[in-house]
Image (cartoon, rainbow, N blue to C red):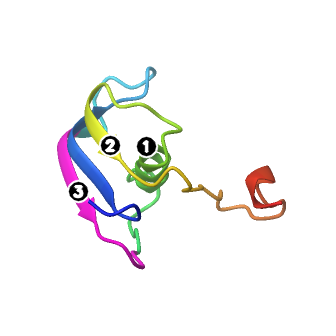
Amino acid sequence: MTHCEVLFRGVEFAYETSATALFENFDLHLPAGWTGIVGANGAGKTTLLRLAIGELTPRQGRVQGPSSALYCAQRTDEPPPQLD
């Protein structure tokens, strides 16, 4: 794995307020370079990205990604403090 790849292996994640898991036994490999995450509202795109940067922790499995990754919320009125 290069330092720019993102790797999910056997990931399970559910929010505490949810009765069902959003991801179960989820595997994903995003190679270095540009990747688009597309889906309907509420499909889990933001959760996937927050798992990728380590802001959320899976119940099971492993997520590996670059330590320098940032998540920029859809509202970009204010840039994240890490971009200063």
Q: Which mark is residue 28?
A: 3
Mark pair 3, 2: CA separation: 9 Å
Residue type at tag 1? Leu
Mark 2 Cα-neighbour bin, 10 Å: few <14, some 14–19, many ≥20: many
Q: Amino acid at mark 2?
A: Val
| Image coordinates for residue 21, horizontal then vertical, percent | 28, 32
Mark toward the start of the polypeptide (1 vs 3): 3
Discs 3, 2 touching: Cβ within 8 Å: no
Find the residue positioned furthest to the front. 2
Asked if marks 1 and 3 touch (Cβ < 8 Å), the reply is no
Q: Secondary structure at mark 3?
A: strand
Instruction: Locate the N terminus by quadrant.
Output: bottom left
Look at label 3 and name its amino acid.
Leu
Instruction: Please give the range of residues in magenta.
Output: 24-35
Task: Residue at 42%, 79% (x, y): give it.
Answer: 34
Against 33, residue 76 (above or below) is above
Q: Quadrant of the C terminus?
A: bottom right
Q: Position of residue 7 (x, y in %)?
A: 28, 53
Q: Nearer the viewer, residue 50 or 29?
A: 29
* Label 1 residue SS: helix
* Picture coordinates of residue 66, whole percent (x, y): 45, 55
Whether residues under marks 1 and 2 lie with C-beta atoms below 8 angstroms apart, the answer is: yes
Is 80 placed left or right of 45 in the picture? right
Spatial CA span between label 1 and label 2: 7 Å
Residue at 74% from the left image edge and 53% from the top image edge:
82
Label 2, on which residue? 63
Residue at 40%, 52% in the rendered image: 65
Closer to us: 78 or 14? 78
What crowding class fits label 1: few (fewer than 14 Cα within 10 Å), some (14-19), or many (20 or more)?
A: many
Q: Is residue 3 left or right of residue 53?
A: left
Q: Is residue 63 magenta?
A: no
Q: Badge 1 is on which residue?
A: 51
